[in-house]
Image (spheres, rainbow, N blue to C red):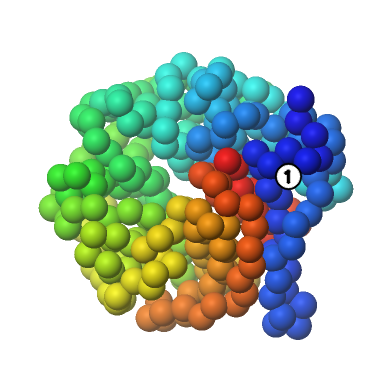
Amino acid sequence: MSTSQDTSVQFLAIQNNNNQWSITTQALPEKTLQALPKAVTASAELSTRENHYTLLYSATTQTLSVFGNDTTEYLVAVAAIKMPNPLDILNVFYLGGMPYLVTYANDGKYLNFYRYNSDHTVSALHNLYVGEGLTMVKALPYRDISFLVAYNGTTGDCTKYQISLPPYDGLSVLETWSASWAKTWGHFNFFQFGGENFFLKANQDHKKVNIDHFMDDPDEGSHPVLSQDATSAMLNAQAISIYQGSEGQAYFLVYQSSGNLTLSSIYPNCLGWWELTNTSVAGSGQTLQPILVNDQPFLLIFS
């Protein structure tokens, strides 16, 4: 049974008081702690027209737990979905204003696509053979289209797909671009400025950190906006996670196995960032999930 002393999850409030930033531990209600799944290995945020949800996946039970983001209890258990296929990567995307999921398992060979239904169930729609070894999968919106990017960190192969709704049931997923990137890029984190898609990535082998811009057309790739030597914190990061505030600014958190946690804000021109605050929390975390409750940012760290 989870208790208030359970260290498998940390819940932190990210606060800005007159440009004085802080990260402080926040207590979760006992019933929320008991509802949280053990061994969270993948997570995502999902929005509908009315509500915001946090999705937490446990590989142990192959279950996707759904929590509503609530102003008083922070997270309220809504549903537990037994996923048809195991997963290591979980993404949410939208078509026609409706949410969908795409998943990938490290030892699998397929991207699996699901419709997320209003009754908090999922319907399998499509699977796409992509082979083993993908280390990044990200679905991205751009104006009136949605596309997906997949990268293999061992081979450097990167592929872009356009996702659309055909006249009948299911999904259409068509390859529109591919290229060979450098190998061993990781810690991919995506954000938008002015409706354009950007992403931060780090390469521990080459000791570099980049911010890249994905081109607008589905048949075009990306180009670097920034490339610089990575700091020791970036190179030693256990996890990096990004979120966007209500004003559109992009913030990212760098978490190290020692428990050091740093919050930075990316410059609007993407030519760097400035550190806002840092703190020490419990180490050994594996999964970071920022959440927004009434535009107030919080951070979940799962061990």
Q: Is residue 219 visible?
A: no
Q: Compared to 103, does 288 lie above or below?
A: below
Which residue occupies the foreground of this view, 166 or 200? 200
Which residue occupies the foreground of this view, 120 or 31? 31
Q: Which quadrant of the figure has residue 23?
A: bottom right
Q: Is residue 139 visible?
A: yes
Q: Position of residue 3 (x, y in %)?
A: 80, 34
Q: Compared to 291, does 191 lie above or below?
A: below
Q: Is residue 267 left or right of residue 280?
A: left
Q: Is residue 69 left or right of residue 88?
A: right
Q: Compared to 203, does 144 lie above or below?
A: above
Residue at 46% x, 64% y is 192
Quadrant in which the N terminus appears: top right
Residue at 47% x, 78% y is 273
Residue at 71% x, 71% y is 22
Quadrant in which the C terminus appears: top right
Question: Dot 1: few (<14), some (14–19), or many (≥20) neighbours within 10 Å?
Answer: many
* Residue furthest front in the image: 258
Q: Position of residue 64 (x, y in %)?
A: 57, 27
Q: Could you tell me the amino acid type at mark 1?
A: Asn
Q: Compared to 148, does 13 lie above or below?
A: below
Q: Which quadrant of the figure has residue 63?
A: top right
Q: Circle 1 is placed at which residue position?
A: 69
Q: Which quadrant of the figure has residue 143?
A: bottom left
Q: How many marks?
A: 1
Residue at 24% x, 53% y is 184
Which residue occupies the foreground of this view, 10 or 157? 10
Q: Position of residue 295 (x, y in %)?
A: 71, 61
Secondary structure of residue under mark 1: strand
